[in-house]
């Protein structure tokens, strides 16, 4: 009976995220939080300097920006919005590797009475400063 009990006890935490995965979750939550707070400097620090960002529309057409153009567009989006915008992650799927992470995050964006949902597909790389976004592909539902 003891070996079976030990096995059951050891497997109880099998579905809990690992410490590295928890760090990635915190990183992604910070990504959404800084954007929602309009902290564009903090938001920008989530990206690797050579990051590329691609938007895919509902017809499958894509548009890709380098980091500076993307960040400028995000800043202007906040500045020209008649109402504050808040984007929150609702569901995260994270696939860990030694130096690379892929994450799929379903999000909800609220702007006054308007609510938009979509998905971000992140590729993160481990740097000397921690995880950074090297590639982001996103779309609206």
Image: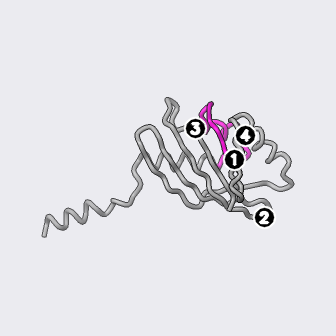
The one of 63 and 115 positioned closer to us in this rendering: 63
Which label is found at residue 134?
3
Tag 3 secondary structure: strand
Tag 4 secondary structure: helix
Question: Which residue is at a point 57% across and 55% down the rendered structure image?
Answer: 105
Which numbered mark, 3 or 2, is in the foreground of this view?
A: 3
Please state the horizontal and vertical placement of residue 20, each as a whole percent of the image.
43, 45
Q: Is residue 34 magenta?
A: yes
Which label is found at residue 35?
1
Answer few, some or many: residues within 10 Å of disc 3's Cα (few below 14, many 20 plus, some between 14 and 19): many
Which label is found at residue 114?
2
Answer few, some or many: residues within 10 Å of disc 4's Cα (few below 14, many 20 plus, some between 14 and 19): some
Please state the horizontal and vertical placement of residue 133, each as a whole percent of the image.
58, 40
Give the alpha-carbon distance from disc 2 to disc 4, as whole Å. 23 Å
Stretch of the chain drawn in magenta: 33-55
Among the two numbered marks 4 and 1 on one chain, the one whose residue lies closer to the N terminus? 1
Give the alpha-carbon distance from disc 2 to disc 1, as whole Å. 17 Å
Among the two numbered marks 2 and 1 on one chain, the one whose residue lies closer to the N terminus? 1
Tags 1 and 3 touching, CB below 8 Å: no
Among the two numbered marks 1 and 3 on one chain, the one whose residue lies closer to the N terminus? 1
Give the alpha-carbon distance from disc 3 to disc 2, as whole Å. 30 Å
């Amino acid at each position: 009976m003891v070996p079976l009990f030990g096995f059951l006890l050891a497997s109880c935490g099998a579905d809990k995220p690992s410490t590295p995965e928890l760090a990635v979750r915190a990183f992604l939550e910070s990504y959404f939080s800084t954007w929602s707070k309009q902290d564009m400097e903090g938001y920008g620090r989530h990206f690797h300097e050579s990051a590329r960002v691609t938007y895919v529309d509902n017809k499958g057409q894509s548009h890709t920006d380098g980091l500076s153009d993307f960040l400028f567009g995000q800043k202007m989006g906040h500045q020209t919005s008649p109402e504050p915008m808040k984007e929150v992650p609702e569901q995260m799927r994270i696939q860990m590797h030694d130096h690379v992470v892929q994450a799929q995050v379903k999000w909800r964006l609220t702007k006054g009475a308007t609510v938009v949902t979509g998905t971000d597909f992140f590729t993160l790389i481990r740097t000397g400063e921690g995880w950074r976004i090297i590639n982001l592909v996103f779309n609206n539902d």
